[in-house]
Amino acid sequence: MKRKNIWIAAVATPVMIAMLLLFAGSPSVKANDQPPAANAAVKIDNFVFGPQTLTVPVGTTVTWTNSDDIPHTSVSTEGVFKSRVLDTDEKFSYTFTKAGTYPYYCTIHPKMTGKVVVQ
Amino acid sequence: MPDKKEDLIDQNLQDLNNDGVDRRGFLKCMAWAGTGLVWSMSGGIPVSRAFAKGYGKDAGKGADFTFVQISDSHIGFNKPANPDVTATLQTAINKINAMPRTPDFIIHTGDLSQLSKPSEFDTLDQVLKGTSAKQIFFVPGEHDMLTDNGEQYLQRYGKGTKGTGWSSFDHKGVHFVGLVNVANLKAGGMGSLGNEQLEWLEKDLKGRSASTPIVLFAHIPLWTIYPDWGWGTDDSEQALSYVKRFGSVTVLNGHIHQIMQKIEGKVSFHTAMSTAFPQPAPGTAPSAGPMKVPADQLQKVLGITGVNYRVSGRSLAVVDSPLGESGASASGNAGEPVAVVDSIHG
């Protein structure tokens, strides 16, 4: 067993170093495998999250902006994220690092719902 | 009234079909609300009559006691719909102080503040200090529980209340219950009372004589006015089932910043005007946000609600008075009522 582990380490370490070097030195590979951090926006207007369903790649930072005269919140139904109270023109951002569907709502006006689909 | 509005009211009040109330008559009253019609309810039949001049002067005379409901003062709001909500709240307090009969107490049905800020609550306290009424009872609106699950609200306005701020008290033979339907709201839902509060309410009402007049007050309407805008309470049916056996039930709400009324059996529902800004009639705007009206019209769509109680007949008369009427002038009356509901039962 011990011998085998050493063998794996001996092979794996140079491969990992090579991969790191390759990734660092080749922007094209980096761009394909891990897109640069993206941004997306949800506008809160007339008591509606727009777009109601937002689909974004992993790593995207989504920013909610309240355009109403009334405060709103953006709170994950499953407890993933929770904004403070957003008064007029205030913003809240959250970066989605895992794929999945994230339903959310305004805790002040719970009829207001939306979701972010992260792929 | 434009047909469109009547149609809307029509849709919204379909549940009236089976309660024995003349629906057309009721709709007529609804259409007139705000333009000076007095209407009353007797034995389940709503009766409307032309609004008589001077009724406001007599309102409260002969009553055993009077109390006033104010709502939705939104202290801290400063947008074009009303850049000075402190001033309009002050006007409301002046109007109450000018009433021919000092109300026994005031009920504030929530949204005291805009953002639950200590400075907003401080300003509210300053203005309310000037009232002639000896006592003020509160229930929170969703704007009062924004930052700390309502802790600050409870410390300031909810002393001696239960849970998130519910409580009951008796006054001269009438049983008052303040309910909280703005806490722990669920995604996609409307207002919510929750099981703990419902259980408390059932116990609170148990054992009381059916002839005791009951007044329920809460921020969000305890009847479904417009689900698309969340203007209703998901579990209000349960609460109302506990008051069904009582001969006279009056339900006072705020939240929607306009007068709406409904009679269902022996239960009269009523929503009050805001002291801060008006909101659109259901479905008449893209959203329920603050409605901008010309500055000189604002005080006609803000107001207070007075309630007069007579022991004989155990009746409560609800009188809405806009801030902008000549109420506080020479005659010293409380302004002329826009609409009156006499819930006379038994």
Image: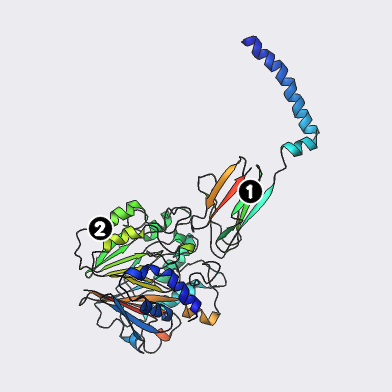
Crowding at label 2, few (<14), some or many (≥20) Cα neighbours within 10 Å? some
Residue highlighted by disc 1: A55
- Report the side of A69 relative to B174 (left or right): right
Residue B62 in sight in this render: yes
Q: Label 1: chain?
A: A
- Report the side of B42 relative to B31 (left or right): left
Residue A8 position within the rendered picture, expressed as x and y whole percent measured from the top left? 68, 16
Residue at disc 2, secondary structure: helix
Q: Label 2: chain?
A: B
Residue that appears at 43% across and 69% down? B12
Labels 1 and 2 positioned on one and the same chain: no
Marks 1 and 2, Cα distance to the nearest angstrom?
49 Å
Residue farthest to the front? Answer: B18
Residue B316 position within the rendered picture, expressed as x and y whole percent measured from the top left? 28, 75
When the figure is inspected, residue A15 is found, relative to residue B18, above or below; the finding is above
Residue that appears at 29% across and 57% down? B201
> What number of labels is visible?
2
Residue that appears at 48% across and 67% down? B75
The residue type indicated by label 2 comes to Asp
When the figure is inspected, residue B296 is found, relative to residue A42, above or below; the finding is below
The residue type indicated by label 1 comes to Thr
Contact check, label 1 and label 2, Cβ < 8 Å: no
**Quadrant location of residue B67?**
bottom left
Residue highlighted by disc 2: B204
